[in-house]
Image (tube, rainbow, N blue to C red):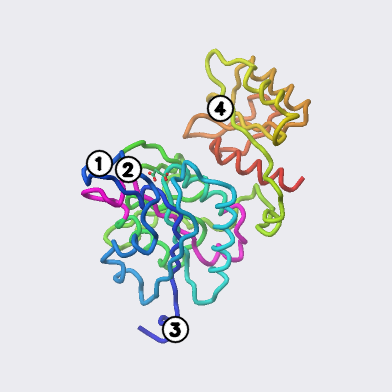
Amino acid sequence: MNSENKLKKLVVLGTGGTIAGIAKRASDNIGYTAGQLGVAALLEMVPGMSDVLKGHTLHSEQVAQVDSKDMRFDIWLALAQRVVYFLQQPEVTAVVITHGTDTVEETAFFLQSVLPPALINSKPVVLACAMRPASALNPDGPQNLMDAATVALADQVCGVVVVCAGVAHAATDVQKAQTYRLDAFTSGDAGPLCYVEEGQIRQLKNWPQMRSEYAKVTIENIAKLSSWPRVEIVMSYAGCSAEVVDALLLAQSHGTPLRGLVVAATGSGTIHQALEVALRRAVQNGVKVVRSSRCIFGKVFSAGPAEFAHFNGLSPVKTRIALMLELMQS
Ligand code: SIN
């Protein structure tokens, strides 16, 4: 170990999830409570960690402790602020975040969209998760955490990346596609970034450079907002009606006003005619309507209603984040 390495740090931030979950019985992979063990305890479950640290010291911090289905905007903001705080320190090489699988793709995309490119284009943020609780007979969390550290400390790695089951995915592309199996994520058409095999990276494509082109808003500006723009998702499906959108418009005068609607459209971006009529009413009421597709693969084509823009291949939940960030600027 040289003197430079002695100073280097890998920071691990905990937010909860199944990776930190505990069940009453070791054989129970489902009936657990997520977000129970602290991040320091999770690191203690990885005996081989020192092998991948390349002389780095570990620093851990608990930012939140939630089941990620309950992820909140205040946690996103706190997480983004802590990531910036640590990445700005010269001795910090990378940040790993432990997170639930259910919304890890949203948190990853949010972070990629708001973290300063000057930081994440030179230092990576790697999210680690697990499909089985820490109390399981054979938990996947320790291996996933070790793989995340391996990716975080690999040469030249940058951007925001999600690691699960030995596969690393870019924040823009990753989607949870499995309810139970350990290899739960896909990057759709884009494919994964790399495999992690026995502590080695087998790289398939370039690391994600730059932040999302959809957002220009800074973390400082987000912190000043009293509330985030309200954007809801509606789905187009057989037998669809105008009622959900009309109910949202009716409620405009109470609570937080609706600023945007994302349509999880059919196929290439088509929308049921009854829903389309209601969406036009929404536009007339000052609501920005954006299309995405229910399909995991492929992109939205402009053949659908042209007045409803789209963010190419972004999934409905990521389109919602992109639209919220866009609306923060107006
Ligand atoms: C969660 O997302 O927090 C629970 C589910 C999981 O991590 O697999």
Q: Residue 268 carries which label?
A: 4
**Which residue lies most toward the bottom here?**
3
| Pick the front one: 233 or 250 | 250
- What's the CA distance linking mark 2 and mark 3? 43 Å
Q: Which residue is labeled 3 in the image?
A: 4
Question: Residue at the spot x=27%, y=66% of the render?
Answer: 48
Quadrant of the image for the C terminus?
top right
What's drawn in magenta, residue-wise? 112-141
Question: Please, is residue 4 above or below residue 165 in the view?
Answer: below
- What's the CA distance linking mark 3 and mark 4? 52 Å
Q: What element carries label 1?
A: loop
* Mark before the other along the chain sequence, 2 or 3: 3
Q: Do the residues labelled 2 and 1 touch (CB within 8 Å)?
A: yes
**Nearest-to-viewer mark from 2 and 3:** 2
- What's the CA distance linking mark 2 and mark 4? 38 Å
**Nearest-to-viewer mark from 3 and 1:** 1
Q: Which mark is residue 51?
A: none
* Mark before the other along the chain sequence, 2 or 4: 2
Residue 306 locus on image (x, y percent): 69, 27
Q: Which residue is labeled 2 in the image?
A: 32
